[in-house]
Every structure is written in C-alpha cells, then in structure tokens.
Image (spheres, rainbow, N blue to C red):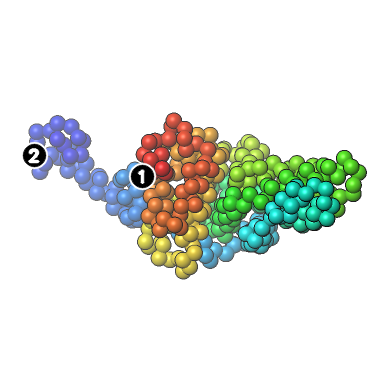
C-alpha cells in the first residue's frame, strides 16, 4: 500500500516518484508548521484534537491584573466581589432560630416565647435579605463580564487569554456560587426560619398587630426571596437565569459566543490541572481547589444554558477528561464537586449521555 495515498501500489518505495513527491510536500508543510505554530500545535493539527485542546494557555488565577481596556468592567465587578467573602462567612456562621421557633410552636399561648422567637428570627431574615440582594448584584456583575468576554471580533479563547483579569473575576463568581450553594444545601434552618417569619407576619397582619420586621422585608420582596431559597442551588439558578437572559437580550450575538466562552473556561481549567508544567506554576496550593471548583461550576452553568447540555457527544467540553481530573484528586477533597455534577446538572440522565460518562459519575 502506498504510504502517502493509501492505495494499492506495486512499486518499491524507493522507486515511487509519486511517494517521494508527497513526502517532500508533507516535509515542507511540517517545517512550515513547526516554524510558525510550534511543536504543540503541530501535534494538535496531526491528531485533529483541536476542539478539546484549543485552550492550551495558562490563565493566571493568582496574579492577573487588569489592562487599561479591562479596568471599567473590572472595577464595577470588583465592588461586588469584595463583599463575597463576608457573605460566605455570614452564611457559614448562620445557626438559625430552631430552638426558639420550636418553643413558640409548642406553647402558642405563651406571649413571652412568641416574642422571643420573633426577636430571634427578625435579624436572621435581615441576613437572608442581604444574601438575596447580593445575588442580584452578582447577576449584574456576571452580565457585565459576559458582555466583555463574548464581544466580537475575538474568539472566546482570545478573550480569555487577552483579558485574564476579567476571566479571573468570572472564575471567582463561579467559585463563590458553588461555595454558597454548598453551605445553603447543608443548612435547613434557612428555609425553616423564613417560613416561620412569613407565617407569623401573616398572622400579625390578620390581627392588626404592628410587626417590627415588616419594614425590613415587604411582601413583594418576601415572595422573591421565598422563590430564591426554595431552590436547591439558588446562586447557580441566579447565574443560569442571568446567562440565559443575556443570550436572549443580545440577539445579534450568536449563542455560541456565550457557550464557547464557558466551554473554553472548562478546558483551560482542565488543561492547567492535568499539565504538570502549568500546575507547577501555582504558588498557592488552594489554587488547585479553586481551579477544580471553577471547572465544575462552568460545566454546570454550560449544562443549564446550552440547548443539549455538557454531556452530549456534540458538547465542546471534554467531560471524560474533566471527570478524570476530579477523580485523580484525593477523594475527600472532590466528593462535593462530583456530587454537584451528579445532582445539580440538567442533562446527565438524558439518553444522549454516554454510558461511560454515567458510569464514571456513579
């Protein structure tokens, strides 16, 4: 068989002028690629593994600083993000008023216990209001970043490589989102407190009793907060809705600009985690867990926003590669992230998801 044309051939390789001609052409082409694209890109071209490996660059999550063109959006988002750690600390320390509420319910005629429960719940609802209002600020910040990272004429890869400070902020929003939702899911007191607050407020209105906490949270806001906290993953739902709204409001922008931005971010995180050369550049061990969390967050967001999701064969996210990266970490450090893929994605159980991927997540 002719090694260049892959057709039956009786000529000796040394005597095949056609073969020599093809080999010379291939050799010239290879030299051209080596010179202008580098060895790594040649391998990508020859293996045709471009989709999953297009995002081979180091995204500096530790030290990225905004360029002049990034500063306007960066400063707007930074005002929001500087409050993120405080929100998480408040949520982590949220203990609820379960004891006071139980006492009040068990002794409905004891006015002192009723007042004590109400006095315990009102400041907690103030905290819940603060968390909800922060989600609205985070949504506005995300939409600003999406506008910057999906605009023409650059591709998602070019945007993320050129605008690393904005990419870092996008990653920080995803990191915060997963941490917030993890804490909320393990704290049933949040919904119990808010339900008690609404029931008691309704009873006070019926009895024309002035309610101290009513000015804190009016009825319209209480309805919106109730929907927010009813979600298993409220911050993720906020980001997912914000991204979908961004796509629908920017009809001149192809949806691929947004979904490709998400899939590229997932690829960047995966490649940095599985490539020793990149991983060795992390100066802080926490950057590894940050990168893992961002990768999972962006996969979940992609799965909620993309019409067929992250698990289909046509997905631009290398799901097998991403799951393998997670499973290569110490089990205790990633079980929560694997559970997030199992239980908060939208398309994992679709028929289009391969049995291998389902098996990897069992």
The residues bearing labels 1 and 2 have C-alpha atoms spaced at a distance of 33 Å
Residue 76 figure quarter: bottom right
- 279 relative to 316, above or below: below
Question: Element under label 1?
Answer: loop
Residue position for label 2: 12
Q: Nearer the viewer, residue 144 or 313?
A: 313
Q: Nearer the viewer, residue 138 or 2?
A: 138
Name the spot of residue 236 as percent of width and height, x first: 60, 46
133 on left or right of 336: right
Q: Nearer the viewer, residue 214 or 289?
A: 214
291 on left or right of 77: left
| Circle 2 residues within 10 Å: few <14, some 14–19, many ≥20 | few
Residue position for label 1: 49
Name the spot of residue 8 as percent of width and height, x first: 14, 31
Dot placed on the residue nearer the N-terminal end, 1 or 2: 2
234 on left or right of 347: right
- Number of numbered tags placed on the structure image: 2
Q: Quick one: quadrant of the N terminus? A: top left
Name the spot of residue 23 as percent of width and height, x first: 21, 44
Q: Is residue 121 visible?
A: no
Residue 316 figure quarter: top left
- 283 relative to 326, above or below: below
């Amino acid at each position: 068989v002719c090694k260049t044309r892959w057709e039956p051939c009786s000529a000796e390789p040394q005597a095949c002028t056609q073969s020599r001609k093809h080999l010379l052409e291939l050799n010239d082409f290879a030299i051209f690629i080596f010179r202008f694209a580098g060895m790594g890109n040649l391998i990508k071209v020859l293996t045709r593994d471009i989709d999953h490996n297009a995002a081979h660059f180091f995204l500096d999550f530790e030290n990225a600083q905004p360029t002049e063109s990034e500063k306007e959006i960066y400063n707007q988002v930074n005002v929001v993000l500087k409050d993120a750690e405080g929100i998480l600390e408040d949520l982590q320390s949220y203990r609820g008023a379960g004891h006071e509420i139980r006492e009040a319910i068990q002794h409905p005629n004891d006015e002192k216990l009723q007042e004590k429960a109400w006095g315990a719940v009102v400041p907690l609802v103030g905290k819940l209001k603060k968390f909800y209002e922060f989600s609205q600020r985070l949504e506005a910040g995300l939409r600003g970043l999406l506008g910057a990272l999906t605009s023409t004429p650059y591709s998602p890869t070019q945007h993320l490589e050129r605008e690393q400070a904005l990419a870092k902020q996008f990653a920080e929003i995803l990191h915060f989102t997963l941490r917030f939702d993890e804490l909320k899911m393990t704290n049933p007191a949040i919904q119990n407190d808010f339900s008690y607050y609404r029931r008691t407020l309704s009873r006070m209105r019926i009895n024309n009793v002035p309610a101290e906490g009513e000015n804190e949270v009016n009825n319209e806001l209480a309805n919106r907060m109730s929907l927010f906290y009813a979600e298993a993953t409220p911050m993720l739902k906020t980001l997912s809705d914000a991204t979908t709204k961004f796509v629908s409001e920017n009809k001149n922008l192809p949806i691929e600009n947004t979904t490709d931005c998400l899939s590229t971010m997932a690829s960047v995180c995966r490649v940095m985690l599985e490539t020793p050369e990149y991983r060795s550049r992390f100066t802080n061990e926490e950057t590894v867990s940050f990168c893992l969390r961002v990768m999972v967050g962006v996969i979940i967001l992609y799965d909620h926003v993309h019409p067929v999701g992250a698990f289909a064969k046509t997905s631009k996210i290398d799901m097998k590669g991403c799951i393998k990266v997670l499973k290569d970490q110490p089990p205790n450090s990633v079980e929560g992230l694997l559970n997030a893929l199992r239980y908060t994605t939208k398309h994992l159980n679709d028929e289009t998801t391969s049995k291998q991927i389902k098996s990897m997540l069992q």
